[in-house]
Image (cartoon, rainbow, N blue to C red):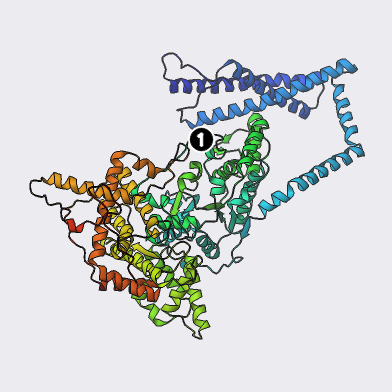
């Protein structure tokens, strides 16, 4: 349809369009006036010439006037451009334009139909002969004869049911597997025994959900004040942090229907089934909402199965995709240094440090792995998709696309009501008989309003939020994001209060000091693990004939829970003493230098390849650390090597994991954070400047660091870059890194030498107890009076003996025999 392209001469665009609209209005009224003025002559012609009765002539006259007006509008639209309504706010003109375009569409359609049937009748008339209009009876009779054949209806019914049967046999079972995962719970149907108050350790997330749900349930007043209710909420965070549990609490306490489906419920073999599942899910939710007062919640667990970024669904074959290597930073070392089920910093498993990054990584590691197709299968699927596009298994984004459409279309008016209103108003407008308004009152069916039912969506995912499709998590869809963090010490205290309160226990466990101690020794525990520990403690107490469990039962249950990799063996005395001194070296170094951390466990129980471990937690959650704090962690890591060399003048193979961990952390410090050695005192010798004294000390530190530095990495490569190797391959960075490691060892060595009696004391206790927890461990370390020596790097006495001969001028010191325990 033509529109005005250029403004009338001398008029702006909006004014030109407005003037054209007024001209159209005058033209259509003139055409109507001409039709009405000539209608008496037409009526007389029908009554006098054709001898029609008055009512028949009147109807024919009205019909001719309507047809004339319709086809005159078609002619006008072909010859005269239509006005653009952009920038025109006059209601009468805009309404007139809508009516005119609607009439044009109606009469154009029926003009095409009329032309088609006229040509058809002409062809039949030429082939059969007879009268032109007599062919209408022939067509009607032929259709009637066909429809009167019983065999036709038998075949139609047979084909219909055969199609349904084939569909049910081929797709029915697969579609049923998807649809049966959709669960609808009406108020009173479901009771999981979980209340909102039972969701502990997520106070901020729970309060945010309370705020959103309260608006969902009674948000009319909120909307009257101009607010807009959120369509959806996204729960994201590591697995095991309470996302699904909070959804169950909502299903139990929410006084509206609740529809749930896992993300796997959208997975389908054939294209289109996943879209059908989404449509069925929306239909069930809206039906439940209509039944129960207009509100329903849809919960999609593991929404990442359907909501991942669409550009990432297909993947890249061969070597086309770019290799994304996360940057190495000092605070992301848990990505590189995470070993065993408890995320040790070293492969030997004896350094466990609780931080926010460690908790996130630990909870992620507990997620059930999903195994995709093999590489050969994926290559075969890509080949099949290239050779036969549009087949099966390639529509990974259809469910997401349909879900987005459904979320946007929840507020749309009902489809049938919209069609009925549109067709009825179009017919009334195209008849030219029924006026649009009389005295300011509309004579048309008002536009249908959206249903009052409200369907809200809650999604839960374990993946980072930036991996989800931006269209899904934008405002208006799942625009409210609720983060579920891994339980901190304060969160665990809240969880412990809930689960210990449910089981019988000694009154001693109710003291604030003991509760705080429990929260400290359960670092890395999920709510489910804390519940299991309390239940196991009660089991131990009942087995001993007691009705309540105590602290010792709780410690035993914690040990039992973590002993999946523990080996119940007894060390020979000399080896056990060496392992105890090794762990004591870690404990003393951590207690002396890591002021922001607190020891929570010291053990020589064997678990896997680890003969023991020292575990600590950060007292306050931190997001950045200074160089001195990172250096303190290096001293902690090398404390065991220093203790072994102080007592035995050599170290065991057990320090290999510590060396690897320290090397990796140092690579992050020098390669990503521009850190160097700590400031130190080096008194110049006679005739020596301060810079020369400092340079001499740094050279010695570099020599020690190069001896300790781990060089057993893979070395990386173009397809598997190693960030540690990349950082230390630069000579200047490797030199600084070696100086840092050397300085950390010198500090650890002097700490162990100064506190030899304290190391002996801790080793004695470990040999007797095997494991020390919580306040008992902290009290033990506090009671030892650990001293940190002041070091002057010009003093030869502070330098440890070389590990091996560096040159003929500086031979290695003779090794002492292994000291008897």
**Mark 1: secondary structure:** loop
Nearer to us in this view, 442 or 290: 290
Q: Is residue 214 left or right of residue 55?
A: left
Check the image and report above or below for 543 versus 9.
Answer: below
Residue 780 lies, in percent from the top left, at 30, 73
Seen as rendered, the residue at the extreme top is 9
When the figure is inspected, residue 109 is found, relative to residue 806, above or below; the finding is above
Task: Provide the residue designation for mark 1.
Answer: 321
Tell me, yes or no, if residue 674 can be seen here: no
**Whole-percent x and y of residue 484?**
44, 57
Q: How many marks?
A: 1
Look at the picture and state if 2 lies above or below 383.
above
- Residue 48 position, x and y percent, is 79, 19
* 455 sits to left or right of 136: left
Quadrant of res 3: top right
Q: Quadrant of the C terminus?
A: bottom left
Choose between 661 and 385: the one closer to the eye. 661
């Amino acid at each position: 349809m033509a529109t005005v392209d250029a403004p009338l001469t001398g008029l702006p665009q909006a004014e030109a369009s407005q003037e054209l609209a007024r001209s159209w209005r005058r033209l259509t009224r003139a055409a109507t006036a001409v039709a009405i003025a000539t209608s008496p002559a037409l009526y007389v012609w029908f009554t006098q010439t054709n001898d029609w009765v008055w009512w028949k002539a009147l109807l024919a006259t009205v019909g001719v006037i309507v047809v004339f007006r319709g086809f005159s509008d078609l002619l006008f639209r072909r010859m005269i451009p239509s006005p653009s309504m952009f920038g025109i706010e006059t209601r009468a003109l805009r309404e007139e334009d809508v009516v005119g375009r609607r009439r044009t569409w109606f009469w154009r359609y029926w003009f095409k139909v009329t032309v088609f049937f006229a040509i058809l009748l002409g062809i039949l008339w030429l082939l059969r002969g007879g009268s032109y209009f007599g062919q209408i009876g022939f067509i009607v009779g032929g259709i009637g004869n066909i429809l009167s054949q019983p065999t036709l209806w038998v075949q139609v019914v047979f084909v219909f049911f055969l199609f349904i049967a084939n569909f049910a046999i081929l797709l029915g079972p697969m579609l049923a597997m998807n649809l049966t995962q959709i669960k609808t719970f009406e108020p009173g149907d479901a009771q999981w025994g979980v209340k909102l108050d039972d969701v502990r350790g997520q106070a901020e997330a729970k309060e945010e959900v309370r705020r959103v749900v309260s608006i969902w349930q009674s948000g009319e007043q909120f909307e009257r004040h101009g607010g807009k209710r959120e369509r959806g909420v996204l729960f994201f965070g590591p697995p095991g942090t309470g996302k699904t549990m909070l959804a169950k609490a909502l299903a139990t306490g929410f006084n509206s229907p609740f529809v749930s489906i896992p993300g796997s419920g959208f997975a389908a073999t054939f294209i289109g089934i996943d879209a059908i599942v989404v449509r069925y899910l929306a239909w069930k939710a809206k039906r439940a909402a209509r039944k129960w007062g207009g509100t329903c919640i849809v919960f999609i667990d593991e929404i990442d199965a359907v909501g991942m970024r669409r550009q990432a669904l297909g993947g890249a074959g061969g070597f086309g995709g770019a290799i994304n290597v996360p940057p190495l930073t000092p605070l992301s070392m848990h990505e590189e240094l995470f070993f065993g089920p408890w995320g040790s910093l070293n492969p030997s498993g004896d350094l466990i440090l609780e931080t926010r990054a460690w908790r996130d990584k630990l909870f992620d590691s507990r997620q059930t792995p999903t195994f995709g197709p093999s590489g050969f299968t994926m290559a075969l699927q890509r080949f099949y998709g290239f050779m036969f596009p549009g087949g099966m298994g390639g529509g990974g984004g259809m469910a997401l696309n349909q879900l987005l459409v459904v979320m946007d279309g929840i507020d749309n008016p009902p489809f049938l009501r919209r069609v009925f209103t549109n067709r009825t108003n179009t017919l009334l407008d195209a008849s030219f008989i029924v006026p649009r308004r009389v005295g300011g009152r509309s004579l048309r069916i008002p536009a249908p309003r959206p249903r009052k039912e409200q369907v809200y969506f809650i999604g839960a995912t374990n993946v980072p939020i930036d991996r989800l499709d931006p269209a899904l998590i934008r405002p208006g869809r799942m625009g409210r994001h609720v983060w579920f963090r891994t339980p901190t010490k304060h969160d665990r205290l809240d969880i412990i209060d809930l689960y210990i309160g449910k089981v019988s226990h000694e009154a001693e466990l109710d003291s604030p000091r003991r509760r705080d101690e429990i929260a400290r020794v359960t670092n890395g525990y999920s709510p489910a693990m804390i519940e299991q520990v309390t239940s196991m403690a009660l089991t131990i107490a009942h087995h001993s004939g007691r009705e309540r469990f105590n602290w010792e039962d709780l410690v035993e249950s914690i040990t039992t829970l973590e002993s999946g990799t523990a080996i119940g063996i007894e060390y020979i005395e000399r080896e056990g003493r060496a392992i105890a001194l090794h762990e004591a070296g870690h404990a003393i170094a951590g207690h002396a230098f890591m002021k922001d951390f607190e020891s929570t466990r010291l053990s020589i129980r064997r678990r896997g390849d680890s003969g023991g471990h020292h575990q600590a937690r950060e007292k306050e959650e931190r997001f950045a650390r200074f160089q001195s704090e990172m250096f303190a962690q290096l001293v902690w890591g090398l404390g065991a090597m220093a203790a072994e060399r102080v007592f035995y003048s050599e170290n065991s193979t057990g320090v290999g994991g510590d060396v690897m961990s320290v090397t990796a952390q140092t690579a992050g410090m020098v390669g990503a954070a521009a850190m160097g050695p700590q400031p130190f005192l080096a008194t110049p010798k006679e005739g020596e400047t301060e810079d020369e004294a400092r340079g001499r000390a740094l050279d010695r530190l570099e020599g020690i660091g190069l001896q300790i530095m781990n060089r057993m990495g893979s070395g990386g490569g173009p397809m598997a870059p190693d960030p540690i190797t990349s950082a230390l391959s630069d000579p200047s960075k490797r030199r600084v890194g070696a100086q840092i490691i050397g300085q950390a060892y010198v500090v650890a060595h002097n700490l162990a030498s100064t506190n030899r009696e304290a190391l002996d004391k801790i080793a004695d206790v470990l040999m007797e107890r095997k494991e020390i927890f919580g306040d008992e461990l902290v009290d033990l370390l506090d009671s030892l009076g650990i001293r940190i020596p002041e070091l002057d790097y010009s003093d030869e006495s502070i330098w440890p003996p070389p590990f091996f001969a560096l040159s003929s001028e500086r031979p290695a010191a003779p090794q002492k025999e292994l000291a008897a325990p």
